[in-house]
Image (tube, rainbow, N blue to C red):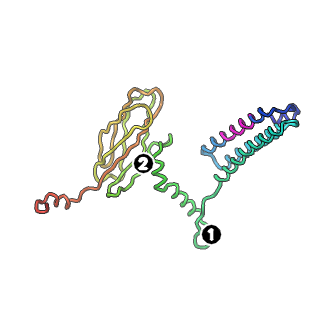
Amino acid sequence: MVIARRLAGALVEPLSFPLLVIVALVVGGLTVAVRLTWQRRDVSIAHRRALDVALSVAVLGLAVAMSVPGTPVVGLVLLWAILGAEETWAWWLYRSRKSPPAQHVVPGGKPSSSAAETSVQRDEDSPGNVLAELELSPREEIVQQLVRTVLPGGGERLAGWLRVPLEAGQRSANLHLAFCPPFSQAPSVNIDHREGPAARIKPVQVLPFGARFDVKLAQPCETTTAVVLHVCAEAMPPVPVEAIRRSNDPAHV
């Protein structure tokens, strides 16, 4: 609209210095907000590039349209500096998203795209990254996020997040957690209520192959919601039969 008014000759009165700075800050802030919001969406690279180009053209056109003869020089400098800094950051961000992963070279001298994809997948799913993610609340679409590890003493630990969906008017729900493969014995389970309406979490049954919990809210929920729980189940390895016999043998004692 601003560009059309400038081309039509309706925009001839220059803005004052304070208005130019306000326009630059508002336009730059809105553009940054749009780019960051779009970056979090699951869209293709082509769509992101189209949006980046469209925003850059719009910002550039707006800056040109606002550069009316007679505009204060300092205001013009700040206008172009602020918008130029925003666009520089935006295209640096675009290039960083576009940077390809490192490729592995297979015998024969040609890069292997499958090897590169495998390397990236392994880096994203490395134990350190997965365990670090377990310290944070899961995204809304994740129902279960669990990691099973081996303890130094030979036992095993299953830790992660569980999300219990609740419909409007619902007050109680049953939660089933499977241990696959089963633990060597019934594990000790700790479960903490992290998000959602106030609720009582009661373990009903804990077996080597799974556990069941009852979730009961303090009052029925008014809207559709969810209770987010952090769970940790640990089981030590069974004591060998020979060790038990030795401990019960009076001669050995």
Residue 226 x %, y %: 45, 35
72 on left or right of 27: right
**Residue 220 location (% of width, % of height):** 41, 26
| Quadrant assignment for the C terminus | bottom left
Q: Position of residue 116 (x, y in %)?
A: 57, 62
What residue is shown at x 56% (from left), y 59% (from top)? 117
Number of other residues with Cα within 10 Å of mark 2, as a class: few under 14, some 14 to 19, many 20 or more: some
In the image, taking residue 140 as reference, residue 248 lies left or right, namely left
Whole-percent x, y for residue 144 in the image: 44, 44
Dot 2 amino acid type? Leu
Q: Residue furthest front?
A: 74
Mark 1, residue position: 110
- Looking at the rendered structure, the kind of residue marked 1 is Lys
Front residue (pair 109, 68): 68
> Which residue shows up at 48% across the image and 56% down it?
126
Q: Residue at x 41, y 29 (%)?
A: 170
**First-in-chain label (1 vs 2):** 1
Q: Name the residue tied to disc 2.
A: 146
Left or right: 58 in relation to 189 = right
Q: Is residue 28 magenta?
A: yes
What secondary structure is found at the residue carrying circle 2?
strand
Q: For the residue labelled by badge 1, is the local secondary structure a helix, a strand or a loop? A: loop
Is 149 left, or right, of 58 in this rendering?
A: left
Q: Give the distance between the C-alpha atoms of the residues marked 1 and 2, in whole angstroms.
A: 38 Å
In the image, the segment drawn in magenta is: 22-33
Quarter of the image containing the N terminus? top right
Q: Nearer the viewer, mark 1 or mark 2?
A: 2
Q: Residues within 10 Å of mark 1 (few under 14, many from 20)?
A: few
